[in-house]
Image (tube, helix red, strand yellow):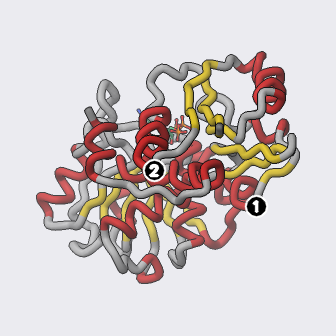
Amino acid sequence: MIKAAVIGDPIGHSKSPLIHGYWIEKYGLEGSYEAIQVSSNALKEKVKSLVDQGYTGFNVTIPHKEAIMALCDEVDATALAIGAVNAVTIQDGFVTGYNTDAFGFIENILQARPGFDFEKGPAFVLGAGGAARAVIYGLLKAGAPHVILTNRTTGKADELKAEYGAALEVVDWQEKENHLANANICVNTTSLGMKSKPELEINLENLPRDALVSDIVYAPLETTLLKSAKSLGNPTVSGIGMLLHQARPAFEKWFGVMPEVTTELQDLVLK
Ligand code: ATR
């Protein structure tokens, strides 16, 4: 019996039990996946107890994605570069941390737009938070020649610039529209446009009409950003796929099956 879980605080809203539970059933596996609420001051003890209880692994969500790194015996290169761990395996008591968000982001785009050429031109990224770190890593790994980054708080974008150097160009949030002209892909990684959050205000007219526009916000599924991109004739990819695809490599590590994202699963998660 394989035991897996997601830990976070709060955890009630997590879609991970639904996603992994769907795959456990679909592939007829002997296993469980549960949501466990763990506060920051209980994290260390809880990880130890999951190891002692024979868990095969677990996902890590807000607010533990950074703190978990110090509790892993090993953190893989991708997670180290992104600076966060969202999935853990436990093998004979040895805890390894991974980050599957960059994979989820890129895979979502490639499944929605097969053959999309990341190398064709620079990527334009809005936001410099945790999600942006995975998206930027994924874009550069996939071959984007460089990333043009804009964030309301310039200091946070500058921190990323210090890590990535010439591969990253920081532009002013107030003047973002002036830097869209060469973009091959435009990605929103901010929380703007999410249900109950303010709208993302950006005029996409300067963007080449064949540039792909993608949002990591998936509630609503079609954000105002995606709507306005569509109305200008740009191709778009919604954010729900990133959530679904980031779950796949972790499931494979624990259960030995690389699961598929189906429309049935997507509908279930969006319900
Ligand atoms: P996540 O881990 O989901 O990326 P985060 O680390 O809190 O969450 O990052 C949220 C992102 O949304 C940041 O880029 C944030 O900009 P700041 O760095 O300036 O805070 C952006 N964001 C949130 N609310 C915003 C707003 N009202 N206007 C502009 N950007 C906003």
Dot 1 corresponds to which residue?
77
Specify the amino acid type for callout 1: Ala
Specify the amino acid type for callout 2: Tyr
Across and down, in percent, residue 260 comes to: 41, 57
Evaluate whether residue 79 shows in this view.
yes
Across and down, in percent, residue 78 comes to: 69, 60
* Number of the front mark, 1 or 2: 2
Quadrant of the snapshot with the C terminus: top left
Q: Residue at x 14, y 63 (%)?
A: 232
Quarter residue 129 falls in: top right
| Mark toward the start of the polypeptide (1 vs 2) | 2
Report the front residue among 269 and 118: 269
Q: Tell me the crowding category of disc 1: few under 14, some 14 to 19, or many 20 or more residues within 10 angstroms, Cα based.
A: few
Q: Secondary structure at mark 1?
A: helix
- In the rendered image, the vertical position of residue 137 relative to residue 11, given as above or below: below
Q: Residue at x 21, y 72 (%)?
A: 209
Quadrant of the snapshot with the N terminus: top right
Q: Residue at x 31, y 61 (%)?
A: 213
Q: Secondary structure at mark 2?
A: loop
Dot 2 corresponds to which residue?
27
